[in-house]
Image (cartoon, grey):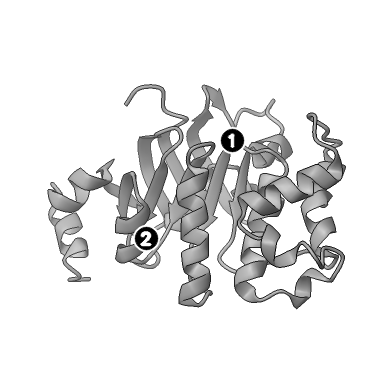
Amino acid sequence: MTNPHIRIRDLQVRYGQHEALKGITVDIPRHQITVIMGPSGCGKTTLLKSLNRFLDLTDGARVSGQVLIDGLNVYDPAVDAIEVRRKAGLLSQRPYPLPMSIYDNVAYGRRLHHMKNGLDLEQAVRHYLELAGLWEEVKDRLHAPASRLSAGQQQRLCLARGLAVEPEIVLLDEPTSALDPISAQHIEKRLLDLKQQYTIVLVTHTLRQARRLADYVMFMYMGELVEHGPAQELFSQPREPRTRAYIAGEF
């Protein structure tokens, strides 16, 4: 793989005595959708959260190995974890809008980081709501509480809020699992558009979604990275028996 955005080297994560990730080494391509798939409890979310040091916030989690973004090891003690999380934002399974207006949700991070970059705040709010596919639905009620939005709209608002701090990488932990099918389609469509500008890493337990979205696939089982490669190759000709069994729906 030429010019990967993220390089993971011998990444191990323990929660107490439990080894959640067992020496993961893989490269993640730039400006593609990489899907991490596998059965429940296999370490998908742990791997995702290790990419932006979100595990720092988890009691008892111990991380060793390297995660390099554009060559910089995010676990180097000199690296600012807050800046890592700005560069690689995480969208969780359920939407968590801030207890404020739609407008202020999107503006919040830009105010916090004192961001200008040629856009005034109103332009920026509109731009990122458009990127998240929400502008037309909310443009006449920007100052209404975000809590009044539907779950699907709230998830797109959270996506807009994450994009507004200008990350390079978007991490998504089963972002459609709590949504109805129409709302899930909205999110999927946005991701296919956004990969032109961002590197996207998506955890999903739904094979159909992985097939629809993935450019690159990582299959995990019991804390191990069993197999990885371009989506078309991995789905059509998996090398490993466990990958074949998972794709065939045997577990």
Residue at point 30%, 64% (across, down): 207
| Residue 66 appears anywhere in the view | yes
Q: Which numbered disc flags the more N-terminal residue, 2 or 1?
A: 2
Query: Which quadrant does the C terminus fall into?
Result: bottom left
Q: CA distance from mark 2 to mark 1?
A: 26 Å
Element type at marker 1?
loop
Residue 190: percent from left, percent from top: 52, 54
Above-or-below relation of 162 to 197: below
Task: Indicate which label's residue lies in the foreground, 2 or 1.
Answer: 1
Above-or-below relation of 224 to 246: above
Q: Which residue in the protein does label 2 denote?
A: 42
Q: Amino acid at mark 1?
A: Glu
Q: Amino acid at mark 2?
A: Cys
Residue 25: percent from left, percent from top: 36, 36
Query: Which quadrant does the N terminus fall into?
Result: top left
Q: Which residue in the protein does label 1 denote?
A: 168
Q: Is the C-beta separation of discs 2 and 1 under 8 Å?
A: no
Element type at marker 2?
loop
Left or right of 20, for residue 51: right
- Depth check: 16 or 96 in front? 96
- Depth check: 245 or 148 in front? 148
